[in-house]
Amino acid sequence: MTSPFVLTPHYTQSEATSASSNSAFAYAIFATLAFTLAVYLFETYLDLRQRSFFFKTEFPTELKSTISKIDAEEKANGKNATAKDEGEKKLDKSQPLLPQLESKFSKSQSYGLDKISFKLFKSLYSLLEDCAFLLYGFLPFAWDTACAWGSKWGHTESDNEIKITLIFLGIMTIIGTITGLPFQLYDTFCIEKKHGFNKQTIGLFISDQIKSLLLTAIIGGPFVALLLTIIKWGGPHFYLYVWAFMFAFSVIMMTIYPVLIMPMFNKYEPLPEGELKNQIYELAGRLKFPLTKLFVMDGSKRSSHSNAFMFGFFKNKR
Protein backbone atom coordinates (compact mmCIF):
# COMPACT_ATOMS: atom_id res chain seq x y z
CA MET A 1 0.00 0.00 0.00
CA THR A 2 1.38 3.39 -1.00
CA SER A 3 1.43 6.11 1.62
CA PRO A 4 -0.25 9.38 0.57
CA PHE A 5 2.64 11.27 2.16
CA VAL A 6 5.27 9.77 -0.16
CA LEU A 7 6.44 12.33 -2.69
CA THR A 8 8.04 11.67 -6.04
CA PRO A 9 10.12 14.38 -7.72
CA HIS A 10 9.10 15.54 -11.18
CA TYR A 11 12.59 14.76 -12.48
CA THR A 12 14.50 11.60 -11.56
CA GLN A 13 17.78 10.27 -12.85
CA SER A 14 17.60 7.42 -15.31
CA GLU A 15 19.62 5.15 -13.02
CA ALA A 16 16.97 5.32 -10.26
CA THR A 17 14.48 2.93 -11.83
CA SER A 18 13.88 0.26 -9.19
CA ALA A 19 10.75 0.47 -7.08
CA SER A 20 12.68 0.17 -3.83
CA SER A 21 15.10 3.00 -4.69
CA ASN A 22 12.25 5.24 -5.85
CA SER A 23 10.32 4.57 -2.63
CA ALA A 24 13.33 5.31 -0.41
CA PHE A 25 14.06 8.46 -2.38
CA ALA A 26 10.45 9.62 -2.09
CA TYR A 27 10.46 9.13 1.69
CA ALA A 28 13.75 11.03 1.89
CA ILE A 29 12.17 13.94 0.01
CA PHE A 30 9.22 14.00 2.38
CA ALA A 31 11.52 13.92 5.43
CA THR A 32 13.65 16.73 4.01
CA LEU A 33 10.60 18.86 3.25
CA ALA A 34 9.19 18.27 6.73
CA PHE A 35 12.48 19.21 8.41
CA THR A 36 12.91 22.29 6.19
CA LEU A 37 9.39 23.47 6.97
CA ALA A 38 9.86 22.87 10.71
CA VAL A 39 13.06 24.94 10.77
CA TYR A 40 11.39 27.70 8.74
CA LEU A 41 8.37 27.86 11.05
CA PHE A 42 10.51 28.01 14.19
CA GLU A 43 12.80 30.74 12.79
CA THR A 44 9.80 32.70 11.49
CA TYR A 45 8.18 32.49 14.92
CA LEU A 46 11.32 34.00 16.49
CA ASP A 47 11.52 36.72 13.82
CA LEU A 48 7.85 37.64 14.27
CA ARG A 49 8.39 37.97 18.02
CA GLN A 50 11.36 40.23 17.37
CA ARG A 51 9.41 42.20 14.75
CA SER A 52 6.69 43.06 17.25
CA PHE A 53 9.24 44.98 19.35
CA PHE A 54 10.09 47.26 16.42
CA PHE A 55 6.55 48.67 16.52
CA LYS A 56 7.23 50.20 19.92
CA THR A 57 7.69 53.95 19.58
CA GLU A 58 7.92 54.91 23.25
CA PHE A 59 11.47 55.50 24.48
CA PRO A 60 12.40 53.06 27.32
CA THR A 61 11.28 54.59 30.61
CA GLU A 62 14.32 53.65 32.72
CA LEU A 63 16.74 54.86 30.07
CA LYS A 64 14.77 58.07 29.69
CA SER A 65 15.00 58.71 33.43
CA THR A 66 18.76 58.06 33.49
CA ILE A 67 19.50 60.33 30.52
CA SER A 68 17.32 63.09 31.96
CA LYS A 69 19.45 63.03 35.10
CA ILE A 70 22.63 63.26 32.99
CA ASP A 71 21.20 66.24 31.08
CA ALA A 72 20.29 67.95 34.35
CA GLU A 73 23.80 67.41 35.75
CA GLU A 74 25.46 68.64 32.56
CA LYS A 75 23.28 71.74 32.55
CA ALA A 76 24.02 72.43 36.22
CA ASN A 77 27.76 72.13 35.57
CA GLY A 78 27.54 74.35 32.52
CA LYS A 79 29.17 71.78 30.26
CA ASN A 80 26.58 71.92 27.51
CA ALA A 81 27.43 75.50 26.70
CA THR A 82 31.12 74.82 26.01
CA ALA A 83 30.90 71.49 24.17
CA LYS A 84 31.44 71.31 20.41
CA ASP A 85 28.97 70.21 17.75
CA GLU A 86 30.20 66.79 16.54
CA GLY A 87 28.15 66.67 13.36
CA GLU A 88 24.66 66.00 12.13
CA LYS A 89 24.69 62.20 12.52
CA LYS A 90 26.58 62.14 15.82
CA LEU A 91 25.37 63.38 19.14
CA ASP A 92 25.61 67.13 19.64
CA LYS A 93 26.99 67.56 23.14
CA SER A 94 25.98 71.21 23.14
CA GLN A 95 22.33 70.09 23.24
CA PRO A 96 20.43 67.87 25.69
CA LEU A 97 20.98 64.17 25.03
CA LEU A 98 17.42 62.94 25.54
CA PRO A 99 15.77 64.50 22.46
CA GLN A 100 18.64 63.36 20.27
CA LEU A 101 18.52 59.79 21.57
CA GLU A 102 14.74 59.69 21.23
CA SER A 103 15.12 60.67 17.58
CA LYS A 104 17.80 58.01 17.05
CA PHE A 105 15.62 55.44 18.78
CA SER A 106 12.72 56.21 16.44
CA LYS A 107 14.97 55.92 13.37
CA SER A 108 16.50 52.69 14.69
CA GLN A 109 13.05 51.16 15.19
CA SER A 110 12.04 52.07 11.65
CA TYR A 111 15.25 50.62 10.22
CA GLY A 112 14.92 47.42 12.24
CA LEU A 113 11.31 46.97 11.15
CA ASP A 114 12.20 47.32 7.48
CA LYS A 115 15.14 44.92 7.81
CA ILE A 116 13.25 42.17 9.60
CA SER A 117 10.20 42.50 7.34
CA PHE A 118 12.49 42.07 4.35
CA LYS A 119 14.14 39.10 6.05
CA LEU A 120 10.74 37.43 6.52
CA PHE A 121 9.92 37.87 2.84
CA LYS A 122 13.33 36.58 1.78
CA SER A 123 13.01 33.56 4.07
CA LEU A 124 9.61 32.72 2.57
CA TYR A 125 11.05 32.91 -0.92
CA SER A 126 13.99 30.71 0.08
CA LEU A 127 11.58 28.14 1.49
CA LEU A 128 9.49 28.08 -1.69
CA GLU A 129 12.62 27.88 -3.84
CA ASP A 130 14.05 24.99 -1.81
CA CYS A 131 10.75 23.10 -1.94
CA ALA A 132 10.40 23.68 -5.68
CA PHE A 133 13.97 22.52 -6.35
CA LEU A 134 13.39 19.43 -4.21
CA LEU A 135 10.01 18.50 -5.70
CA TYR A 136 11.20 19.07 -9.24
CA GLY A 137 14.38 17.13 -8.66
CA PHE A 138 16.52 20.09 -9.61
CA LEU A 139 19.78 18.83 -8.09
CA PRO A 140 19.69 15.53 -10.04
CA PHE A 141 18.72 17.54 -13.12
CA ALA A 142 21.68 19.91 -12.61
CA TRP A 143 24.03 16.95 -12.13
CA ASP A 144 22.79 15.29 -15.34
CA THR A 145 23.18 18.62 -17.12
CA ALA A 146 26.76 18.83 -15.88
CA CYS A 147 27.38 15.29 -17.14
CA ALA A 148 25.90 16.19 -20.52
CA TRP A 149 28.07 19.29 -20.81
CA GLY A 150 31.11 17.35 -19.64
CA SER A 151 30.57 14.62 -22.23
CA LYS A 152 30.67 17.25 -24.96
CA TRP A 153 34.14 18.22 -23.74
CA GLY A 154 35.25 14.61 -23.50
CA HIS A 155 34.60 14.17 -19.76
CA THR A 156 32.41 11.33 -18.52
CA GLU A 157 31.07 10.88 -14.99
CA SER A 158 32.93 7.61 -14.42
CA ASP A 159 36.44 8.77 -15.28
CA ASN A 160 36.19 12.53 -14.64
CA GLU A 161 34.03 12.80 -11.54
CA ILE A 162 35.97 15.79 -10.22
CA LYS A 163 35.55 17.79 -13.43
CA ILE A 164 31.84 16.98 -13.57
CA THR A 165 31.53 18.06 -9.93
CA LEU A 166 33.18 21.40 -10.72
CA ILE A 167 30.77 21.95 -13.62
CA PHE A 168 27.85 21.07 -11.32
CA LEU A 169 29.03 23.49 -8.62
CA GLY A 170 29.53 26.16 -11.28
CA ILE A 171 25.92 25.75 -12.40
CA MET A 172 24.64 25.97 -8.82
CA THR A 173 26.80 29.03 -8.07
CA ILE A 174 25.52 30.90 -11.12
CA ILE A 175 21.90 30.05 -10.33
CA GLY A 176 22.34 31.05 -6.68
CA THR A 177 23.89 34.36 -7.73
CA ILE A 178 21.06 35.12 -10.16
CA THR A 179 18.25 34.26 -7.71
CA GLY A 180 19.92 36.15 -4.87
CA LEU A 181 20.78 39.26 -6.88
CA PRO A 182 17.34 40.97 -6.65
CA PHE A 183 17.39 40.62 -2.86
CA GLN A 184 20.89 42.08 -2.59
CA LEU A 185 19.93 44.99 -4.85
CA TYR A 186 16.78 45.77 -2.89
CA ASP A 187 18.55 45.53 0.46
CA THR A 188 21.43 47.75 -0.66
CA PHE A 189 19.74 50.35 -2.86
CA CYS A 190 16.29 50.50 -1.25
CA ILE A 191 16.41 49.72 2.47
CA GLU A 192 19.96 50.89 3.20
CA LYS A 193 19.54 53.95 0.97
CA LYS A 194 16.16 54.82 2.54
CA HIS A 195 17.76 55.00 5.98
CA GLY A 196 20.83 56.88 4.80
CA PHE A 197 23.39 54.08 5.16
CA ASN A 198 24.18 53.09 1.58
CA LYS A 199 27.04 54.87 -0.17
CA GLN A 200 27.70 52.19 -2.75
CA THR A 201 27.30 52.92 -6.46
CA ILE A 202 25.82 50.38 -8.86
CA GLY A 203 29.24 50.16 -10.54
CA LEU A 204 30.96 49.26 -7.28
CA PHE A 205 28.21 46.74 -6.50
CA ILE A 206 28.70 44.99 -9.86
CA SER A 207 32.47 45.10 -9.43
CA ASP A 208 32.19 43.39 -6.03
CA GLN A 209 29.95 40.68 -7.49
CA ILE A 210 32.37 39.96 -10.35
CA LYS A 211 35.36 39.85 -8.00
CA SER A 212 33.52 37.48 -5.66
CA LEU A 213 32.63 35.11 -8.50
CA LEU A 214 36.19 35.15 -9.82
CA LEU A 215 37.61 34.42 -6.38
CA THR A 216 35.09 31.60 -5.94
CA ALA A 217 36.31 30.06 -9.18
CA ILE A 218 40.03 30.68 -8.60
CA ILE A 219 40.10 29.50 -4.97
CA GLY A 220 36.99 27.35 -4.66
CA GLY A 221 37.58 25.28 -7.79
CA PRO A 222 41.05 23.96 -6.86
CA PHE A 223 39.92 23.56 -3.23
CA VAL A 224 36.99 21.29 -4.19
CA ALA A 225 39.12 19.36 -6.69
CA LEU A 226 41.83 18.71 -4.11
CA LEU A 227 39.26 17.82 -1.45
CA LEU A 228 37.61 15.22 -3.68
CA THR A 229 41.01 13.84 -4.63
CA ILE A 230 41.89 13.38 -0.94
CA ILE A 231 38.54 11.66 -0.29
CA LYS A 232 39.08 9.22 -3.16
CA TRP A 233 42.70 8.61 -2.20
CA GLY A 234 42.18 8.38 1.56
CA GLY A 235 40.23 5.12 1.63
CA PRO A 236 38.43 4.14 4.87
CA HIS A 237 40.27 6.81 6.88
CA PHE A 238 39.67 9.64 4.42
CA TYR A 239 38.11 11.82 7.13
CA LEU A 240 41.44 12.13 8.93
CA TYR A 241 43.14 13.40 5.78
CA VAL A 242 40.20 15.73 5.09
CA TRP A 243 40.52 17.16 8.61
CA ALA A 244 44.24 17.77 8.15
CA PHE A 245 43.63 19.37 4.76
CA MET A 246 40.87 21.63 6.09
CA PHE A 247 43.05 22.72 9.00
CA ALA A 248 45.98 23.56 6.71
CA PHE A 249 43.70 25.37 4.27
CA SER A 250 42.17 27.47 7.07
CA VAL A 251 45.59 28.51 8.34
CA ILE A 252 46.76 29.43 4.84
CA MET A 253 43.61 31.46 4.13
CA MET A 254 43.86 33.31 7.45
CA THR A 255 47.40 34.26 6.47
CA ILE A 256 46.84 35.36 2.87
CA TYR A 257 43.29 36.73 3.17
CA PRO A 258 44.20 40.09 4.76
CA VAL A 259 47.24 40.48 2.52
CA LEU A 260 45.92 39.46 -0.90
CA ILE A 261 42.13 39.25 -0.90
CA MET A 262 40.87 42.03 1.37
CA PRO A 263 42.83 44.75 -0.54
CA MET A 264 40.90 43.74 -3.68
CA PHE A 265 37.74 45.19 -2.15
CA ASN A 266 39.00 47.95 0.15
CA LYS A 267 41.94 50.28 0.56
CA TYR A 268 43.95 49.98 3.79
CA GLU A 269 46.16 52.76 5.08
CA PRO A 270 48.14 52.87 8.35
CA LEU A 271 46.33 54.79 11.10
CA PRO A 272 48.02 58.21 11.44
CA GLU A 273 49.91 59.08 14.58
CA GLY A 274 47.74 60.68 17.23
CA GLU A 275 45.66 60.18 20.35
CA LEU A 276 43.44 57.48 18.85
CA LYS A 277 46.38 55.34 17.78
CA ASN A 278 48.05 55.74 21.15
CA GLN A 279 44.88 54.73 23.00
CA ILE A 280 44.41 51.63 20.84
CA TYR A 281 47.99 50.49 21.37
CA GLU A 282 47.65 51.17 25.08
CA LEU A 283 44.51 49.01 25.21
CA ALA A 284 46.24 46.24 23.24
CA GLY A 285 49.16 46.39 25.68
CA ARG A 286 46.89 46.03 28.71
CA LEU A 287 45.19 43.02 27.09
CA LYS A 288 48.56 41.58 25.98
CA PHE A 289 47.32 41.47 22.39
CA PRO A 290 50.29 41.41 19.97
CA LEU A 291 49.13 44.33 17.84
CA THR A 292 51.69 45.21 15.18
CA LYS A 293 49.57 46.52 12.29
CA LEU A 294 46.75 49.04 12.58
CA PHE A 295 44.90 50.28 9.50
CA VAL A 296 42.06 52.55 8.45
CA MET A 297 39.74 50.96 5.86
CA ASP A 298 37.71 52.94 3.33
CA GLY A 299 34.56 51.06 4.27
CA SER A 300 32.60 54.31 4.08
CA LYS A 301 32.56 54.08 0.29
CA ARG A 302 29.99 51.28 0.67
CA SER A 303 28.14 52.09 3.88
CA SER A 304 27.96 54.67 6.65
CA HIS A 305 27.61 51.92 9.26
CA SER A 306 30.50 52.06 11.72
CA ASN A 307 32.67 48.98 12.02
CA ALA A 308 35.96 47.72 13.40
CA PHE A 309 37.47 44.24 13.34
CA MET A 310 40.62 42.20 13.89
CA PHE A 311 41.96 39.59 11.50
CA GLY A 312 45.07 37.56 10.78
CA PHE A 313 47.23 34.78 12.14
CA PHE A 314 50.52 34.64 14.03
CA LYS A 315 52.57 37.77 13.20
CA ASN A 316 50.04 38.78 10.55
CA LYS A 317 47.44 39.99 13.05
CA ARG A 318 46.03 43.37 12.14
Image (cartoon, rainbow, N blue to C red):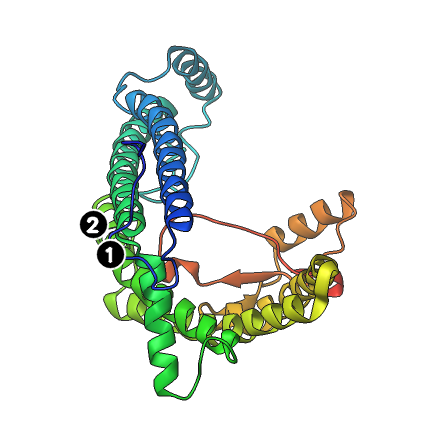
| Residue 230 in the image, given as x and y percentages of width and height | 66, 69
Q: Which residue is mark 2?
A: 190
- Disc 1: which residue: 185
Residue 292 visible here? no
In primary-sequence order, the first of circles 2 and 1 is 1
Query: Do tag 2 and tag 1 residues touch (Cβ < 8 Å)?
Result: yes
Query: On the rendered image, what quadrant is the N terminus found in?
Result: top left
How many numbered badges does the structure rendering display? 2
Which residue is located at x 51 percent, y 70 percent? Answer: 220
Q: Amino acid at mark 1?
A: Leu
Q: Is residue 143 above or below residue 138?
A: below
Helix, strand or loop at label 1? It is helix
Q: CA distance from mark 2 to mark 1?
A: 8 Å
Closer to us: 174 or 155: 155
- Residue 126 picture location, percent across and down: 29, 45
Which quadrant, please, contains the C terminus? Answer: bottom right
Amino acid at circle 2: Cys
10 Å crowding of disc 1: few (<14), some (14-19), many (20+): some
Q: Image point 33% across, 42% down: which residue? A: 89
Q: Quadrant of residue 138?
A: bottom left
Name, please, the residue furthest toward the bottom: 154
Q: Nearer the viewer, mark 2 or mark 1?
A: 1
Q: Position of residue 292 (x, y in %)?
A: 72, 62
Task: Give the structural element (helix, strand or loop) at label 2.
Answer: helix
Identity of the residue drawn at 32% across and 21% down: 53
